[in-house]
Image (tube, rainbow, N blue to C red):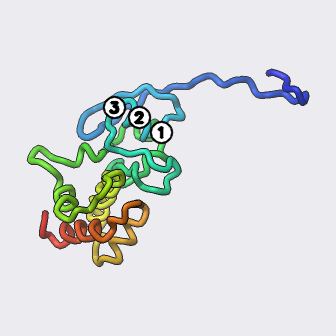
Amino acid sequence: MKTTRSGTRAPAKQDQYTVDVFAVVNGAPVQWRVDTRTTLLEALRDSSGLTGTKRGCDQGACGACTVHVDGARVLSCLMLAAQVDGRQVTTVEGLAGELGMHPMQEAFLRHDAFQCGFCTSGQLMSAVCLLREGRAGSDAEIREYMSGNLCRCGAYPNIVAAVREIADGAGA
């Protein structure tokens, strides 16, 4: 241990710890060797080049980094990469299927449910889960369960319209 000017002892510098993480991302197996402090967001963007997941606030307040882990929506800026070892991760890049865009992506386009587009990937990921969770009974319910995703441009009415369309079966 080193001694500081005030005479107290400073903790020794910690070693860098790394872990191997094996996951399935967008249907493909991946292996990351990451520092134990690496977030899922950092691993997706920096180690896998999946930049559709956005870094917004880095505090879990904006929802721009929303992804699915084992089918549930999570804020990837708050989850450590090591926590997805052995799990399924889906990013916005994984929503589209072999036949083209996901119906929610198409509905977002039809309803102009984005403006600058920065929040769109997180909005899409939350909207898909919201439907899977059966939480689209009314526009108020859609707004409530999408409230963790912020849009600085104010595209909320169009986002609700897009989710409503898919919930009602018009675009599915």
Give percent across and percent down for residue 35.
51, 28
* Residue type highlighted by circle 2: Ala
* Residue type highlighted by circle 1: Thr
Name the residue tied to disc 1: 39
Residue 133 against residue 38 in the figure, above or below: below
- Left/right placement of residue 98 relative to residue 162 reads left
Q: Secondary structure at mark 3?
A: loop
Q: Residue at x 26, y 65 (%)?
A: 131
Give percent across and percent down for residue 18.
51, 25
Q: Residue furthest right?
A: 7
As drawn, the label of residue 16 is: none
- Left/right placement of residue 162 relative to residue 150 reads left
Q: Nearer the viewer, residue 73 or 171?
A: 171
Quarter of the picture containing the N terminus is top right
Name the residue tied to disc 2: 43
Q: Secondary structure at mark 1?
A: loop
- Structural crowding at the residue carrying mark 1, measured as other residues with C-alpha within 10 Å and reported as few (<14), some (14–19) or many (≥20): many
Give percent across and percent down for residue 80.
48, 40
Residue 150 figure quarter: bottom left
* Residue type highlighted by circle 3: Ser
Quarter of the picture containing the C terminus is bottom left
Asked whether the beta carbons under mark 3 and mark 1 sit within 8 Å of each other, the answer is no
Q: Secondary structure at mark 2?
A: helix
Give percent across and percent down for residue 52.
31, 43
Q: Nearer the viewer, residue 130 or 6?
A: 6
Asked whether the beta carbons under mark 1 and mark 2 sit within 8 Å of each other, the answer is yes
Nearer the N terminus, badge 3 or badge 1? 1
As drawn, the label of residue 48 is: 3
Compute the Cα span from label 2 to label 3.
Answer: 7 Å
Asked whether the beta carbons under mark 2 and mark 3 sit within 8 Å of each other, the answer is yes
